[in-house]
Amino acid sequence: MKREGMWSLKLSTAALVLIPVAIGINYIGKFFAELLRLPLWLDSIGTALASMLAGPIVGALSGAINNIIYGLTVSPISFVYAITSVAIGLTVGIMAYKGWISNLWKAIVMGLVVGLVAAVVSTPINIGFWGGQTGNVWGDALYAFLLAHNYPVWLASFLDEIVVDIPDKVATIVVAFAIFKGLPKGLISLFGGGKKIEKL
Amino acid sequence: METLSLYVDRDSPVHRVDPISKLLYILAATAIPIILPSLLTAAVVLAISVALLLLGRIFRRVIPLISVIVFVLLTILIIQGLFRAGNVTPLFQLGSLIFYREGLLYAVRISLRVINIMLAFAILILTTKPSDLFETLVRKGLSPRIGYVLSSVLQIIPQMQNTVGTITDAQRSRGMETEGSLAVRLRAFIPLIGPVVMSSLTQTRERSIALEVRGFSAKGKKSFLNEEIQEPYHRFIRWGLLLSIILALVWRVAA
């Protein structure tokens, strides 16, 4: 298996087959979050896992297709946030490749970075699409409070998003990390993730 | 075979239109109100979308789709009406809360835009079989491997959801707690999601072998199982939609 670094566009069949499973995992994460009434979305665990296993391109594709399919089957709003999912897939893929999944603490840091990236990417979409809110009760309450005290819209919207994104993404990355560490090595090498392959 | 989709099987003029035209309609319905940002444009596009939904006899199915959105739009209406920077003209008062004209107008504009986009998407989603949509995209040049990925998601997700049900029951019967404090509920998450993920990922190995054996990555032109249905009026609709966007641009530049 030839590895041309993390930006290789040669998608193996295994990597492509991973994408629907990653999206399924996203759906399941969301389902359990609702079933267990957790105050988190947990709808990008699959995307993060796909990035860890097969790199940023596959992760980004998983994110994009996830939002497209969710948009077609549940709620069209998801189409609008496809870019955020792509950003999450790219961030996790790049950081995982650079070794940020070697232990739990690094994974938590990666979660913080991903949360920040997601908030930064989502805020312009939130502002352009519906004036800065996010549809989340707590975030929007904060937004209303900040707006009432004459904070600028971009700041209120950014804080609205980040207050929800950081806990959610840290939890997401930690869960994806836990799953990744629990996978048999054979499965990891199937997708091309992990360390560089040594040749004799 | 169970697939995930909101498609409503009816025979209506809207159902018979090809998916590309509906995609172009979404583009037009989104772009034109942005190019010509007036309440009149938004209202006209909204009326057209509603008419198409009624024509497709799927209007009632849209209600659950947009009910979630409507709630968020209400909160937008309240928050922008009360707190938007630049609110100077009071419109009405509820107790000690003053609602301003500028904020409310802004919120109304946002709401119309959001509802327009949602309805345009609904027209596509409710009247097009996802498999037809993906097949049309592959015909137009989308990589067949990506086309496969898109179609397979719709089949794999119901399978995984069934597995989830089985595993949840199994874990519960072994005494795992799913009710109680937040800590209890958090602890239940991994034992539930772990087995499902493991079994699904293991299946991918078999699936990728099965695909390879059937020539998934083979070079060369792929053929299609279904005949392509091309009505002459489809082209008319597509060009009409593109033309309307161009006209809107011209109007905006000229006016």
Image (cartoon, grey):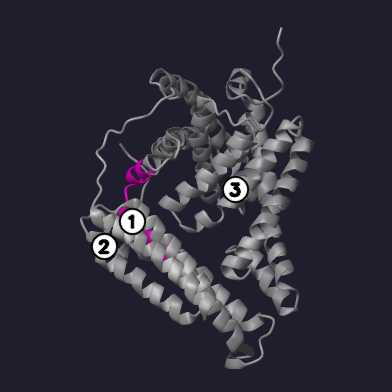
Front in this rendered view, residue B171 or B104: B104
Give neighbour class at mark 3: few <14, some 14-19, many 20+ (Cα, 10 Å). Answer: many
Q: Secondary structure at mark 3?
A: helix
Question: What residue type is disc 1 on?
Answer: Leu
Residue A27 placed where, x, y %? 50, 44
Front in this rendered view, residue A36 or A46: A46
**Left or right: A163, with B116 as reference point:** right
Front in this rendered view, residue B249 or A28: B249
> Label 2 belongs to which residue?
B56
**Left or right: B89, with B40 as reference point:** right
Say which chain tag 3 marks: A
Residue B44 against residue A6 in the figure, above or below: below
Q: Secondary structure at mark 2?
A: loop
User: How much space separates mark 2 and mark 1, taking CA atoms?
Assistant: 9 Å
Say which chain tag 2 marks: B
Question: What residue type is disc 2 on?
Answer: Gly
Residue A31 seen = no
> Label 3 belongs to which residue?
A85
User: How much space separates mark 1 and mark 3, taking CA atoms?
Assistant: 24 Å
Question: What residue type is disc 3 on?
Answer: Ser
Does the CB distance between marks 2 and 1 fall below 8 Å? Answer: yes
> Label 1 belongs to which residue?
B126
Give neighbour class at mark 1: few <14, some 14-19, many 20+ (Cα, 10 Å). Answer: many
Write down the region rendered in magenta.
B116-136
**Left or right: B240, with A91 as reference point:** left
User: Residue A128 lies in what quarter of the image?
Assistant: bottom right
